[in-house]
Amino acid sequence: MPVSVPVSTRETKRTINQSVEKLIRKTVDLKNPLGKQWIQNLTRNRETLRESYMSVLLVEIIIFIVDSGCSKHMLGNLKLLINFVEKFLGTVKFRNDQTAPILGYGDLVQRAVMIKRAYYVEGLNHNLFSVGQFCDADLKVAFRKSTCYIRDLKGNDLLTGSRGTDLYSIILQATPL
């Protein structure tokens, strides 16, 4: 049978927490002469460690939509292009009647694959691969139920993508932010 303690002799939670806190402080003081500074450094180090883990975990995923209605490969991220030639090439009109300037072109490199003459379109939110441009470069574009393939004439897979809801997309690379 439990022992009943009168209400007036019980310690409140706050008093208990303060007692435990004092005990921890004394333990820290005994272990390290720096005392409170040691706890502050520990807290700071924990925050720094958390930030460094977060920076390692954040990556930018680069997705291209395989588009049969797109006349040229287009992207909105200039950092992805090498050998960039800055030249106004006109404008591109999208299906929703919006237009955007084509400000140049360059080469896109992914592993051993180089995609030549990809247009940089300022403000483009979705990178686009042109089925027609792949075919003009003597590559085969094959669509299956849930996958698409870009192959050379020997049948080697150069790029492979997957089907989302209605669109086929290719994830090129994941780069740290």
Image (cartoon, helix red, strand yellow):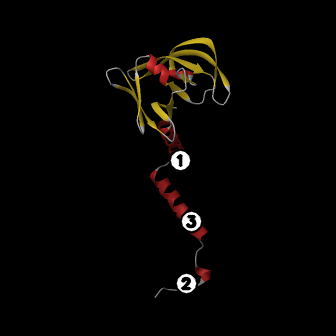
Alpha-carbon span between mark 2 and mark 3:
20 Å
Where residue 148 appears, as percent x and y from the top left, is 42, 32
Where residue 33 appears, as percent x and y from the top left, is 49, 49
Mark 1 nearby-residue class (10 Å; few <14, some 14–19, many ≥20): few
For residue 96, side relative to residue 57 (left or right): right
**Which is more toward the observer, 118 or 69?**
69
Where residue 138 appears, as percent x and y from the top left, is 40, 17
Mark 2 nearby-residue class (10 Å; few <14, some 14–19, many ≥20): few
Q: Amino acid at mark 1?
A: Thr
Q: Amino acid at mark 2?
A: Val
Q: Amino acid at mark 3?
A: Asn
Q: Which residue is mark 3?
A: 17
The residue drawn where x is 52% and y is 22% is 73
User: Badges 2 and 3: C-beta atoms under 8 Å apart?
Assistant: no
Judged from the image, the secondary structure of the residue bearing numbered disc 2 is loop
Q: Earlier in the sequence, mark 2 or mark 3?
A: 2
Where residue 71 appears, as percent x and y from the top left, is 54, 21
Tag shown at residue 5: 2
In the image, farthest residue toward the left: 154
Q: Which residue is mark 1?
A: 43
Judged from the image, the secondary structure of the residue bearing numbered disc 3 is helix
Alpha-carbon span between mark 1 and mark 2:
39 Å
Q: Earlier in the sequence, mark 1 or mark 2?
A: 2
Judged from the image, the secondary structure of the residue bearing numbered disc 1 is helix
The residue drawn where x is 53% and y is 86% is 4
The residue drawn where x is 62% and y is 81% is 8
User: Badges 1 and 2: C-beta atoms under 8 Å apart?
Assistant: no
Alpha-carbon span between mark 1 and mark 3:
20 Å
Q: Earlier in the sequence, mark 1 or mark 3?
A: 3
In the image, farthest residue toward the bottom: 1
